[in-house]
Amino acid sequence: MLTLRAMHPRPPPRRAVLFAAAVVLCAADVIHAQPPRSESSPAARPVPQSATPQSYEPALVEAGRARFGANCGFCHGPDATGGSGGTDLTRSEIVATDERGNRIGPVVRTGRIEAGMPAFPTLSESDLTAIVAFVHDQKAKAEAAVGGRRSVEVEDVLTGDAQAGRRYFESACSSCHSATGDLAGIASRIEGLALLRRMLYPGGQAGGGRRPTATVTTRDGETVAGEVTYRDEFTLAVVDGAGRYRSWPTDRVRFTIDDPLEAHVAQLPRYTDEAMHDVLAYLHTLR
Ligand code: HEC
Ligand code: HEC
C-alpha cells in the first residue's frame, strides 16, 4: 500500500477533511464491493475502441501531457501506456467509454485507494480537463497503432456473469426497467461497447432528451436556476437564464437537481468493474 502523503505532498489544509472523507469512503467502498480480480496480461488485452471518438485542441493536449506527467505518469507511464504499478490507460474500458471526462473524472477524484490509485480531490477542473484530453489523444494513437478503427469484438467486453448480472439488475434497475418491457430485445438493437455505453449514459445519445436543470441556493440566500453544464461530487456548474456560467463547490450551497437520468448518474460510482460487466452480460441475453 502506498503512502498517500507521498502522493499528495502539499494538500491545501482546508481541503484535508474532504480528502480524508474521500479516502475513507473510497476505501470502504473498495473493501465491501470489490472482489479480487482475475489477472490477465495487460499487453494481451486488446485496445478497445473509443465508444465516442473525441478530438481536442493540440494546445490542450500538450498542457495535459505536462499535467499527466506530473500527477499520473509515475504510475501510468509518461505516455499513459502503463508504468510502475498503474494500468495501461489506452487499454482501459473506462477510458474507452469516457466522454470528456465523465468516467475518468470520478476515478481521479475518488481514486481506488485499495488498488493503489490515490484520490485527487483538489486537482483543478482545468488540469483535469487537460489530462483527459491527453489521455484521449494517447488512446487515439494506440488505436491507430493496432490497425486503425478496428471494431471491438463483442466477446471482448462480454466477460461478465449473466446470472449475477440478472440479480444485480433486479435489485438496482427493475424499479424503472423491465427485461420483458422497455429493455426487451435491446441486445438485438445494440451490443458490445455501444450497449455498455448506452447502459452507463443513456442521456449521452444524439438527440437524447433535455439536459438536467438545477436550482441552487447560495449561502447569501441567492437562488440561481439553470441548465447543469458540469457536475461531480465536488463541483456543480450551471448556465443561468441570462446565459451566465456559475459554479460552486457542492458543500457550499444547497441545490436540487431535476434530471430524468438522475438514477444513472448516481449509479456510476456504485458499479464495480465486475458488476458492470455482469449487468452487461445479462443485458446481452435480452434478444
Ligand atoms: C500511485 C500510482 C497511481 C497514480 C499516481 C495514478 N494512478 Fe490511476 N491507477 C493506478 C492503479 C494501480 C490503477 C488500477 C486500479 C484498479 O485496478 O482498480 C489505476 C486506475 C486508473 C484508472 C482506471 C483504469 C481502469 O480501466 O480501471 C484511470 C482512468 C486512472 N487510473 C487515471 C489516472 C489519472 C488521470 C491519474 C493522474 C491524475 C492517475 N490515474 C494517477 C495507480 C495510479
Ligand atoms: C430511477 C429510474 C432508473 C433506474 C433505477 C435505472 N434507469 Fe436506466 N434509464 C432510465 C431512464 C429515464 C432512461 C432513458 C430512457 C429513454 O431514453 O427512453 C434509461 C435508459 C437506460 C438504458 C437505455 C435503454 C435504451 O433503450 O436505449 C439502459 C440500457 C439502462 N437504462 C440500463 C439501466 C441499468 C442496467 C440500471 C441499473 C443498474 C438502470 N438502468 C437503472 C431510468 C432508470
Image (spheres, rainbow, N blue to C red):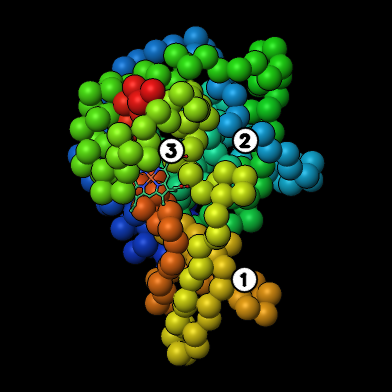
Q: Quadrant of residue 229?
A: bottom right
The circle drawn on residue 199 is 3
| Nearer to the camera, 216 or 202 | 202
Front label number (3 vs 2): 3
What residue do we see at 50% from left, 28% from top? 190
Q: Which of disc 2 and disc 1 is earlier in sequence?
A: 2
Ligand 2 closer than 8 Å to label 3 CB: yes
Residue at left 51%, top 42%? 104
Q: Secondary structure at mark 3?
A: helix
From the image, tell me which residue sits under label 1. 239
For mark 2, what is the residue?
52
Q: Where is residue 133, by image quadrant?
A: top right
**Gap between marks 1 and 3 measured at Cα:** 27 Å
For the C terminus, give its image quadrant.
top left
Asked whether the beta carbons under mark 1 and mark 2 sit within 8 Å of each other, the answer is no
Nearest to the observer: residue 64 or residue 152: 152
Label 3 amino acid?
Met
Q: Give the image location of residue 262, x and y in percent.
A: 40, 57
Q: Residues within 10 Å of mark 1 (few under 14, many from 20)?
A: some
- Give the Cα separation between the discs numbered 3 and 2: 14 Å
